[in-house]
Image (spheres, rainbow, N blue to C red):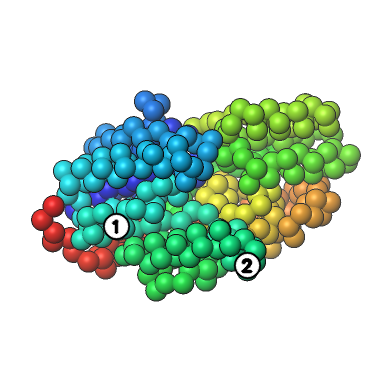
Amino acid sequence: MTIVFLIDQMSLHGGIERVLSIKANYFATQENVEVHIITSEQKNEPLCYRLDPNIRLYDLQINYHREKSYFHPKNLLKLPKHIYTLRKKIKKIRPDVMIVCSHSTDTYFVPFILKRIPKVKEFHFSKAIELPYRENPSHWKKTYFLKFADFVESKYDRLIVLNADEAKYYKTDNVTIIPNPLTFYPDAIAKLKEKTVITAGRIAHVKGYDRLIAIWELVVKEIKDWRLEIYGTGSPAYVQMLQDEINQRNLQHQVILMGATDQIQAKLLEASVFAMTSHNECFPLVLLEAQACGLPIIAYDCPHGPRNIMSSENGCLIPLNEEQQFADALVQLITTQEMRIKMGENARKNAAKYRLNAVMRQWELLFKSLPTNTAHL
C-alpha cells in the first residue's frame, strides 16, 4: 500500500505536525506500506519531529504568502503551479490513498484532481468557529464561501474528525471519527512535587496565553513560589506581545516563555499541573500527553476538545472566560497535593485508551473501507 500525506510544512512545532509524524512513522514500519509526505512550503527548513528514514519527503516549493489569506490575489497566482506540480508528483507516486492534513489551499482542489485516487481530509480545528457566519446572513461573503467548503468536503471519500461533538457540524455522510493517538505513554509518571504549572502549544491568539498570563497574576496574589512555563513558538511579534504583557504585570520571574522543545515528555514529567486556556480546540493532543504523564489538568471548556478528554475525576473544566474561577482552581490544585495525585492517577488511566496501536487500527480499518484505486495514472 502506498500512502501520501499532504501538509504545508513539517518545520514548525505543532499538533498537526506531531500527529502526522506519529502516523507516518507507524505506517512506515508496517510490512508492504510505502509512505510519502508532500509539503508545499518547507523552505529547506529542518524537520520539527523525527521521521522514519524510509519515509519519502518532497517539497513543491509553492511558498505562499502566509501573512495573507490563501485567497489573496498574490496567493491565487501561485495556485496553478501548486495544482500542476502536485498532480505531476502524484502521477509518479501512484498512491492508494491521499490524506490532506493541514487546512491550506490544497484542501479545496485535491478532490478534483486524479479523481479515482481515494482521498481523505483530516480536520484539526473546531467547526464551532464557523457558527457566527453560518447563522448571520449579513456575513454573506463568508456564508457563500462556507457553502463552497461544504461542497468540497462532500467530494472527499472520508472526512476525519476527532470527536463526536465535531461530527455534528458536517452536512455530509462521509464523516468518520478517529481520535489522535498518544505520542508516548512513559513508564514513569510525574511526581507532582515540582512547583511548576506547564502549558504547551503553538503561540497564537487562539491558544489564549494572554488570558493565562492574566490568570497567573491572580494566582500570584496567593501563591508566590510557583511558576508558569509556556512552551511553543509563533510569530515573533505575537511572542513579543506576550512578553510585554508579562513585563507589564511584573511577572518576569513567575511566567517564562520557554520557546520550542522536542523534549515535551521530559518537561511534562517535571511539572505538577497542566493548564489550557484556548478559545477553541478540536482534540488537544497535548492534554492526552499530559494525562499520560500523570498530570492533573485545568482547562477552559472551549469548543470542543477538552470536554471529550477530561472529566471531574482527572481535572477541572472551567466555564469559558471565567478567569477568577480558573485561578481559584489552580490555587486549589497547587495547595492540595492529595488532589493533584488522585487526579493525576485518573488522568493516566484515561490516557491509556488512546495508545498508538488502538488508534492506528482504526486508520487501517478506514483504509480497507475506501474504494480501490484502479485508475491508470
Left or right of 245 on screen, residue 81: left
Above or below residue 17? Residue 361 is below
Quadrant of the rendered image containing residue 321: bottom right
Amino acid beneath label 1: Phe
View extreme (bottom): residue: 173
Q: Residue at x 25, y 50 (%)?
A: 3
Find residue 52 and report its horizontal and vertical position in percent. Answer: 30, 37
For label 2, the SS is loop
Asked if marks 2 and 1 touch (Cβ < 8 Å), the reply is no
Q: Residue at x 62, y 61 (%)?
A: 139
Disc nearest the viewer among 2 and 1: 2
Q: State the mark number for residue 68.
A: none
Left or right of 32 on screen, residue 154: right
Q: Nearer the viewer, residue 72 or 199?
A: 72
Amino acid beneath label 2: Pro
Q: Residue at x 22, y 66 (%)?
A: 371
Q: State the mark number for residue 112.
A: 1
Question: How many tags in the picture?
Answer: 2
Q: State the mark number for residue 137.
A: 2
Left or right of 336 on screen, residue 166: left
Find residue 278 and report its horizontal and vertical position in percent. Answer: 65, 50
Above or below residue 59? Residue 91 is below
Find residue 186 and report its horizontal and vertical position in percent. Answer: 49, 44
For label 1, the SS is helix
View extreme (left): residue: 376
Going from the N terminus, do you reach mark 2 or mark 1 first?
1
Mark yes or no: residue 291 visible. no
Task: Tell me the distance, in whole angstroms, between the alpha carbons under discs 2 and 1.
Answer: 29 Å
Q: Residue at x 28, y 53 (%)?
A: 98
Mark yes or no: residue 219 visible. yes
